[in-house]
Amino acid sequence: MEHTIVSASGFNAYFGKNHVVKNVNIEIPRNNVIAVMGPSGCGKTTFLRCINRMHELTPDATCDGKFLLDQKDIYEMHPIFVRLKVGMVFQRPNPFPNLSIYENVIAGYKLNGIKLPKADRDNVVEQSLTRAALWNEVKDSLHKKGTFLSGGQQQRLCIARAIAMEPEVLLLDEPTSALDPISTSGIEELLHELKASYTLIIVTHNMQQAARVSDRTAFFYMGELVEYDNTKKMFTNPADVRTQNYITGRFS
Ligand SMILES: Nc1ncnc2c1ncn2[C@@H]1O[C@H](COP(=O)(O)OP(=O)(O)OP(=O)(O)O)[C@@H](O)[C@H]1O
């Protein structure tokens, strides 16, 4: 039996009066990959940013309804704690440009004022880079700047930085859209390995990618969660005509 790790009920998000995520109800099982899809502007990124409470960092942005992590209300927790438990990887790889690879991986600890002895720091760096499938490529250049890496390596470094904090959930907002096909397939393979340890929620515009990497797909349209189902089922036999129109390319 699959356990729910994240769930939303009657969840709404707004920018001022603009209602951009509408009455969303969803249950996300642990150790699954969930693809979030839908036309541009339908609220995918906003939905993602509500899960780790980044939405509220935008002036005039509000939300209501319930979002639970491990059955506890995300909006009753400290936002910093939520962001430790729910890591985020962005569209463009964004390692801190002035920090070395080593310092990038450990950056979340420094930012949160968590002090670790050197041996523990070394261990976190090695474990996180190993999990992000980057250790072998960088183990001899840990003190070089993160920005000297290729785009795909930089994105894996950002994944290592996120998992160094031992999150339960990893949010990925179009993590491969700035990468070449070979780096993209490296990240896709990595997602497959990471799901043994984490629950992954990935926004993607690429339907082939959603079909390759995800167990379930959530299809949003104009802020509404129109359909949420097993990915194979959704791509072969969608229940809603709007999903069908989207996957058959009738609108993008
Ligand atoms: N910072 C902001 N201030 C005001 N409105 C915003 C802001 N960010 C997004 N919006 C609006 O919220 C709605 C949802 O945007 P969001 O970025 O969540 O959609 P999306 O599905 O992720 O789009 P895309 O696929 O183009 O990235 C859009 O109408 C957008 O214009």
Image (cartoon, rainbow, N blue to C red):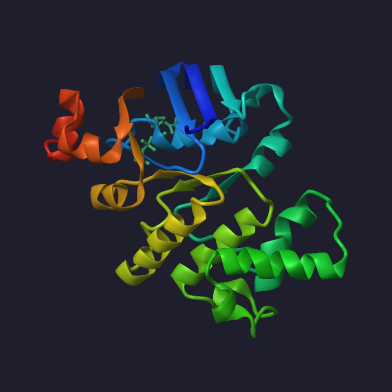
Q: Classify 104 as above or below 19.
A: below
- Front one among 249 and 164: 164
Q: Considering the image in quadrants, where does the C terminus appear?
A: top left
- Front one among 6 and 246: 6
Q: Is residue 248 visible?
A: yes
- Measuring from the top left, give residue 156's x and y in whole percent: 52, 65
- Farthest-out residue, front: 1
Q: Classify 5 as above or below 194.
A: above
- Measuring from the top left, give residue 228's x and y in whole percent: 33, 28
Q: Classify 211 as above or below 181.
A: above
- Front one among 225 and 231: 231
Q: Residue at x 77, y 55 (%)?
A: 109
Q: Is residue 20 visible?
A: no
Would you say 176 lies left or right of 115 here?
A: left
Q: Residue at x 83, y 52 (%)?
A: 114
Q: Classify 47 as above or below 128.
A: above
Which quadrant of the view contains residue 56?
Answer: top right
Q: Residue at x 67, y 64 (%)?
A: 105
- Measuring from the top left, give residue 227's x and y in whole percent: 29, 26
Would you say 186 lies left or right of 82 here?
A: left
